[in-house]
Image (spheres, rainbow, N blue to C red):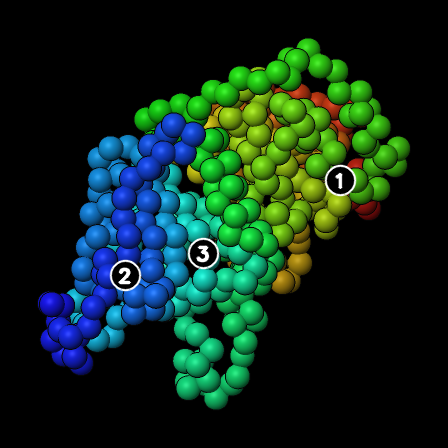
């Protein structure tokens, strides 16, 4: 019998309270997992539902293992009035206090609505299938409150979040692809903040010569190129696992291996906006750097940026304090940091992208790299005006 009796709840059968919790292994390494069951009262978040998830998170933190949530929920279980509200608060508190302690990964395989949407937003990584959606209020609620009709896809669809809001780290077509990529991500991460990331030796020769790198940069410094063509040859087996690939494309973030060791990669992308750092790019880079620092993952930065993006829109959008997040993230990082200046390193963007002034342990410059306080033409226009 359900512990709530209002609205006939005592006569309803809700298997496992709508959420399955337990423990498992990914490639021999322990993880804690919960999965919301949409077939059980829409996977809604009730009081006992929340207590089960919170208890699992406490266990994960105590054991020092990652938490993986498979989310598919209609949000708050309204039948139970205030009980679920308290447990929402308890869940959000745990998402917050365990941030940087154990990795937290959210998998969105259906619709996640209402207050339940905040929990994935507090986790480290979000994986979504293209047919899934997540929003604070669904289309029906939006229509009731505003009179406007809107589709699931445009309101909170996975593609929208991958390209516009930046909520999604990995977007895939199928559930099988998502689950495989989650396993791939876990292989890069330590179990908790007290451990180093796993070492996975491979057969890539450490003395391999990447001759293709000599052909990447165009002769003219103003011409764009794809920074991925620099990143891939550098790392083991030319593999790179990119995060937030569809969002803030002028900033590249992701994981790779160097001689078997997991590293975080941050890079400017000259192919998009010329590699300038805008608000979205700064926040994307800063969040990734902070995660790597929290979990002992060395950071390798590839720099080719002419500046922070300037103009009225950037200033009104808060570029000064939002752009400073990238500076702050690199400056406070204590993990090993190596920076490669590929081409342009100008102005404040040069400092912000893992420069020696912020604590980089080694800085390498590509032949022909340009390091300056401002672009040459800008300097000339000011000095000789």
100 left or right of 211 in image: left
**How far apart are labels 1 and 2 at the CA level?**
46 Å
Of all residues, the one furthest to the bottom in this rendering is 147
According to the picture, the residue beneath numbered tag 1 turns out to be 226
**How far apart are labels 3 and 1 at the CA level?**
30 Å
Please name which of the two marks, 3 or 2, marks the residue nearer to the observer: 2
Which residue is pictured at 72% across the width and 49% down the height? Answer: 272
Tags 1 and 2 touching, CB below 8 Å: no
Of all residues, the one furthest to the top in this rendering is 207
382 left or right of 5 in image: right
Q: x, y percentage for residue 238?
A: 67, 27
Which residue is pictured at 47% across the width and 38% down the height? Answer: 183
Please name which of the two marks, 1 or 2, marks the residue nearer to the observer: 2
Pointer 3 local density, CA inside 10 Å: few below 14, some 14–19, many at least 20: many
Q: Mark 1: which secondary structure? A: loop
According to the picture, the residue beneath numbered tag 2 turns out to be 18
Of residues 381 and 223, the one drawn nearer to the viewer in this rendering: 223
According to the picture, the residue beneath numbered tag 3 turns out to be 108
Which residue is pictured at 52% across the width and 41% down the height? Answer: 181
Which residue is pictured at 28% across the width and 52% down the height? Answer: 20
């Amino acid at each position: 019998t359900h512990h709530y009796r209002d609205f006939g709840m005592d006569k309803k059968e809700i298997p496992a309270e709508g959420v399955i919790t337990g423990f498992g292994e990914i490639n021999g390494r322990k993880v804690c997992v919960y999965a919301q069951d949409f077939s059980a009262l829409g996977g809604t978040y009730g009081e006992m539902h929340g207590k089960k998830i919170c208890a699992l998170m406490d266990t994960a933190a105590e054991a020092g293992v990652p938490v993986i949530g498979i989310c598919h929920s209609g949000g708050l279980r309204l039948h139970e009035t205030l009980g679920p509200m308290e447990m929402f608060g308890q869940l959000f508190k745990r998402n917050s206090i365990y941030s940087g302690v154990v990795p937290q990964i959210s998998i969105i395989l259906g619709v996640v609505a209402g207050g339940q949407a905040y929990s994935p937003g507090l986790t480290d990584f979000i994986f979504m299938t293209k047919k899934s959606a997540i929003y604070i209020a669904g289309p029906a609620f939006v229509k009731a409150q505003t009179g406007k009709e809107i589709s699931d896809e445009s309101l909170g669809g996975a593609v929208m979040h991958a390209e516009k809001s930046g909520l999604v780290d990995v977007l895939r077509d199928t559930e099988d692809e998502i689950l495989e990529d989650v396993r791939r991500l876990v292989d890069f991460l330590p179990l908790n903040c007290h451990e180093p990331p796993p070492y996975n030796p491979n057969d890539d020769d450490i003395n391999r010569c990447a001759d293709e790198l000599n052909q990447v940069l165009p002769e003219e410094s103003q011409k764009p190129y794809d920074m991925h063509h620099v990143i891939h040859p550098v790392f083991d087996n030319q593999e790179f696992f990119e995060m937030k690939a569809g969002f803030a494309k002028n900033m590249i973030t992701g994981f790779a291996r160097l001689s078997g060791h997991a590293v975080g990669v941050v890079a400017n992308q000259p192919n998009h906006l010329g590699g300038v750092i805008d608000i979205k790019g700064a926040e994307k880079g800063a969040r990734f750097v902070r995660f790597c620092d929290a979990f002992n993952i060395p950071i390798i930065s590839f720099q080719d940026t002419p500046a922070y993006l300037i103009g009225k829109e950037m200033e009104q959008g808060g570029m000064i304090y939002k752009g400073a997040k990238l500076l702050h993230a690199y400056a406070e990082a204590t993990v090993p940091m190596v920076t490669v200046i590929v081409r342009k390193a100008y102005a404040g963007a040069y400092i912000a992208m893992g420069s020696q002034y912020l604590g980089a342990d080694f800085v390498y410059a590509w032949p022909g790299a340009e390091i300056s306080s401002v672009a040459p033409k800008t300097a000339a226009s000011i000095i000789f005006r």
